[in-house]
Amino acid sequence: MGLFGRFFGRNREPVLDPADLSVLGVDVHSHLIPGIDDGAKTIEDSLNLLAEFQELGYKKVITTPHVMSDYYKNTPEIILKGLADVRAAKAKRGLTIEIDAAAEYNLDADFEPLIDADNLLAFGDNYVLFELPFIAEPHMLNSIIWKLQEKNYKPVLAHVERYAYWHQDWEKIAGLKDRGVFIQLNINSLTGHYGPEVKRIGEKLVDNNMVDLLGSDCHNLNHMGLTQRARTKSHLHKVLSSEKLINKKLSFEPTSY
Ligand SMILES: [Fe+2]
């Protein structure tokens, strides 16, 4: 590869020196509890992934197993039991990175009763991570946002850039901000891993200073490799310099549940 290629890559994008992810401190979206969703399969997987996060400079991960009707019927008890097992194994391995757990709630029929019952795993200052179906915008979106806020939760919408039904509807995304929804961007979206449109929207969120939280959405070692690649992207450099990123304000200390 010639000089031009090295600095601009295949798509004439600038290729920067790898960004320092330690400025984030805390990752807020991943699937590291073994065997309870489509993330880590074994405790060994969990430890290998945690070692990678530590190597990247993170001090803590708040892992977020899926809670989804029909597929991943995870309860706080299941998640926290898994967390305790990972913490014990992590201590034996001598890893210094901390791990906490919350959840990634799918906006399906089972979500509303959990909000009503105050049976949610939140993180930080009562943030609740939730995701939408990828097929179509759910009709309950507005009422669920309102309900979360009424219960004093702070709704964080996972990987806002990944919902194809909003790719030509920027006003919808901008409207979420107006209603107090916190925007979480997947770091790996900036690599083009989820497609060019997802990358475009991710970059637009960065350019409009709309990103509140960054997440790896790490399920496996392949995702960690993508995060490594994302470090050379100019938009990652740009978003990491944002003072509004909530990741930077989250405590590094482990939470005791
Ligand atoms: Fe996720």
Image (cartoon, rainbow, N blue to C red):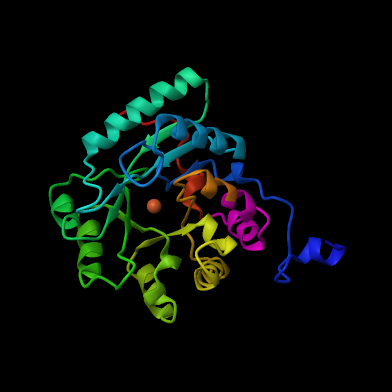
Count numbered badges in the picture.
0
Reply yes or no: does residue 228 show up in magenta: yes
The quadrant in which the N terminus is found is: bottom right
Which of 207 and 3 lies nearest the eye of the viewer?
3
Look at 48% across and 34% down and name the residue there: 252
Reply yes or no: does residue 18 show up in magenta: no
The single residue placed furthest to the right in the displayed view is 3
Specify the quadrant of the image occupied by residue 121. Answer: top left
The single residue placed furthest to the top in the displayed view is 92
The quadrant in which the C terminus is found is: top left
Side (left or right) of 89 relative to 133: right
Query: Could you say where residue 18 lies in the image, as x and y percent from the top left?
Result: 70, 50
Which of 183 and 225 lies nearest the eye of the viewer?
225
Query: Could you say where residue 5 lies in the image, as x and y percent from the top left?
Result: 80, 65
Look at 41% across and 65% down and name the residue there: 160
Query: Could you say where residue 81 lies in the image, as x and y percent from the top left?
Result: 27, 29
Residue 188, compared with residue 202, is above or below; it is: above
Which of 8 and 62 lies nearest the eye of the viewer?
8
Q: Main secondary structure of the magenta part?
A: helix
Side (left or right) of 210 relative to 18: left
Look at 68% across and 55% down and name the residue there: 232
Please provide the residue range marked out in magenta.
226-243
Query: Could you say where residue 124 lies in the image, as x and y percent from the top left?
Result: 37, 43
Look at 44% across and 77% down and name the residue there: 167
Side (left or right) of 204 relative to 257: right
Which of 211 and 97 lies nearest the eye of the viewer?
97
